Amino acid sequence: MNPKILIGIPTYSGKAYCESEFFERVLEISYLKKDFAVLIVDNTRDGGEYAAHLKATYPEFKVLHFESNDVVYKRLFMSHEEIRLQALKMNVNYLLHLESDVIPPKDIIQRLLLARKSIVSPLYHLSLSANRHLVQRNRQWGMAFSDKYSWGYAYGHANSSYVDGTIKRIQTSGIGCILIHKSVLTAVPFRYRENVDSAPDSAYAKDLLLAGYENFCDTGTVVKHLNSEDWGQGNINLLEKYEGNEN
């Protein structure tokens, strides 16, 4: 029997630039349709207009709308947490948390399930300034922990010794594409930190670590992170830039 999966997708209207490419890929996911469901949580502050558009365009998916706070990171937290609660309510075996500008391979579920881990995510192929690179977004086990910047885990180009197709234990990861077992979902909620310049995924990675859960990266699976925003980082070493800026 296949594990039951919820694909949980937080989004907002700013991701409309890649909406077609992203949702077409979600529709192409090759896991048996009866064994997974798709939930979209939209947090655009527009009275539900973008959510209504998504409902009309993608009737295959369940769409919820939350916009009750004007703090961006708090709206993000509410989206992540609602996805977690819905996964528990549905009693699925795993949540595939997938952000709406991350394009996974069609067999992403099968690939991550093969790792046989309670928490596992792929490598990211993302844009740093005008250039696109394969990066080690997930920080290796044993490195100093710094959780202020959720995307500060990328530290230069992934090298061939790291990207060897194996499953590696890691210290932290983002949640742009991550498979989480229901036992972890039950034990570790998402949270919002007042006055901290960081998205909720960095707090989640830290909470997993503190709760004693092992986090893993499948170095044989790569997803494309479109991130149209120019983060202005060029090719700098993000780990060096943000190491020590803990909060």
Image (cartoon, helix red, strand yellow):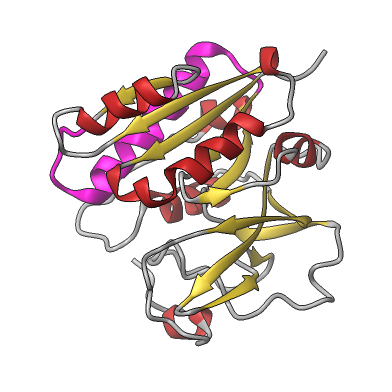
- Residue plotted at (79% across, 18% down): 2
Is 88 inside the magenta-drawn segment? yes
Left or right of 133 on screen, residue 77: left
Residue at x 37% of width, y 72% of height:
230
Left/right placement of residue 161 relative to residue 3 reads right
Observer-nearest of 85 and 210: 85
Q: Quadrant of residue 181?
A: top right
- Magenta stretch, main secondary structure class: helix
The residue sitting at 46% across, 35% down in the picture is 9
- Quick one: quadrant of the N terminus? top right
Q: Is residue 177 left or right of residue 77?
A: right
Rendered location of residue 157, percent (x, y): 66, 79
Q: Is residue 28 magenta?
A: no
Q: Residue at x 58, y 34 (%)?
A: 26
Q: Which residues are magenta?
A: 67-93
Q: Which corner quadrant holds the C terminus? A: bottom left
What percent of the width, then of the height, locates residue 136?
Answer: 65, 69
Q: Nearer the viewer, residue 137 or 208?
A: 137
Name the spot of residue 183 as percent of width and height, x first: 62, 26
Residue 92 drawn above or below residue 219: above
